[in-house]
Amino acid sequence: MGQRPNTLTPEASPQHFLGAKMREWRTRRGLSLAKLKNRIRYDYSYMGRVERGEQAPSEALVRAYDQALEAGGRLVRLYLQIQSGADIVALTRDHVAKAGPHVANGLPDLPDSLPGHALSEEEGVAVPCRTSDGRIIFVSVPRRLFLGGIGAAAAGIAAAPLAQASRPAPRIPVPDSNPIEHFQAIRRVLIDSDNLFGPHQLLARVQEQINAITALREGKRGADRRQLLQIQTQFAELCGWFHQDAGDHRAAQYWTDRALQWSHMAGDPDLTVYVLARKGQLAGDMKDPVEAVDAAEAAEEAARPGTRLAAVAATYAAHGHALRGDARESMRAYDHARELLHGDINPESTWGVWLDDAYIDVHRSRSLSALGDHQAAADGFRAAITALPAGYHRDKGVYLAREALAHAGARDAEQASSVGLQALAIGAETRSARILTELAQLDSVLLPWRDVPSVREFRDALNAVVLHEA
């Protein structure tokens, strides 16, 4: 017997009303949260908070619900109504004609099984698009259009390969001598290539390695099996990171969750902690502060002494606090991360070797920007860019885009445009959705200065690399 769902209060606010409607559609289709999670690849605790009205959903989550539950666009329209400022009175008036017996407080009998749901070619990828009134918005475009080709610039921005683990594992030959070293060498090459060129050309390669490792695991036992699971976990986490940078957060969640699952199977607690911390980072990129803080703090609590993992986790938790608007707790967490970094670290530990003061500072700058301290954020990004080692080309583009947005927040439109152009050059080359998302926001913030020549130059340049409304 399943646990009876919590009573909802749809009349409490527009957010509660939307959450109740999302649950109503789910229960109409006879799906539990866990079964819907298997279809849309979102964390079910996040879905539950949204349905209870405890957290605002992202537009991507609402669209995923609408499509998976065959709601015919009703949930998306309701979400857009709320985004445009509709209050609870207007919402209840608009929807009362369609109201039937409210089913959100009780579940019907569920079928024993439902067919699995893979990410299909009809599902959407977020792509920047210039609207007729000059704004840049992100629209959902079916992946199949990219497979057929809809324009080199737009396809390059968002056409990430599908995240499917059910594909049969091909028998890809690997050296008989030491396959672990072979895969580790490939992973290092992929990471270096990503820093230079971005993720899009690499996603197929990383998934090929995952399939090859799956084939090699057959019949293995003991230490051989654990080592293969460890390297497979590392490739799955890398695949999640590539999708995250490509802007496909659903696929990023899927692969990061697979990495977490495989890390437990491998019996590697450090690897599990690292993937859990990465879930906190991903949640921060998705602007989900509750999940960001919860995942990162869980990772910090589980981290073994002597590694940098606790400092990594504390850094990601700090940004989650900033997304909540809690400046004091965010800055305290960054100070805590720095203390952990300079604590008693085993020099032989390889975990988080990239974590240094500059890495913490750049995340702190992002949090300062989220908290409204734009000038301090811009100064922090400038210092981080100056200190960035050679080879981190794509990361430089991300930092430049965020610096530009901070300058715009500080009302320095000319400097924002100048730095934004530098970021755009890297964004167009690497096709990083993280860069282009920041620049789309910059484009919107700079609207009051659209007649300034440098702003016009930036907007024209951005205009050349995005789709346009038909």
Image: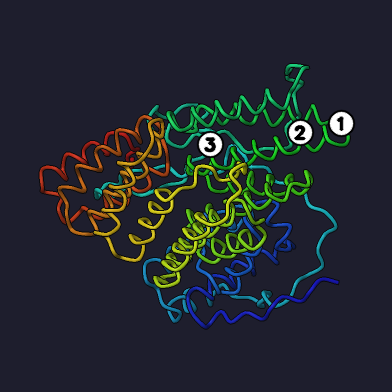
Q: Mark 3: which secondary structure?
A: helix
- Scheme of image coloration: rainbow
Q: Please tell me which residue is depicted at 34% across the width and 32% down the height of the picture.
A: 428
Q: CA distance from mark 2 to mark 3?
A: 32 Å
Q: Which amino acid type corresponds to the residue marked 3 in the rendered image?
A: Arg
- Give neighbour class at mark 3: few <14, some 14-19, many 20+ (Cα, 10 Å): many
Q: Which amino acid type corresponds to the residue marked 2 in the rendered image?
A: Leu
Q: Quadrant of the C terminus?
A: top left
Q: Mark 2: which secondary structure?
A: helix
Q: Which of the marked residues, 1 or 3, is nearer the chain's N terminus?
A: 3
Q: Nearer the viewer, residue 139 or 470?
A: 139
Q: CA distance from mark 1 to mark 3?
A: 37 Å
Q: Nearer the viewer, mark 1 or mark 3?
A: 1
Tell me: 354 left or right of 382: right
Q: Which residue is mark 3?
A: 143
Q: Quadrant of residue 61?
A: bottom right
Q: Which of the marked residues, 2 or 3, is nearer the chain's N terminus?
A: 3
Question: Residue 106: where, in percent of width, then height?
Answer: 73, 76
Q: Which residue is mark 2?
A: 228
Q: Mark 1: which secondary structure?
A: loop
- For residue 220, which numbered disc appears in the image? 1
For the question of whether residue 72 can be seen, the reply is: no
Q: Nearer the viewer, residue 33 or 305?
A: 305
Q: Quadrant of the N terminus?
A: bottom right
- Give neighbour class at mark 2: few <14, some 14-19, many 20+ (Cα, 10 Å): many
Tell me: 423 left or right of 267: left
Q: Mark 2 and mark 1 in contact (Cβ < 8 Å)?
A: yes
Question: Residue 414: where, in percent of width, then height?
Answer: 15, 48
Position of residue 319 relative to residue 134, above or below, is: below
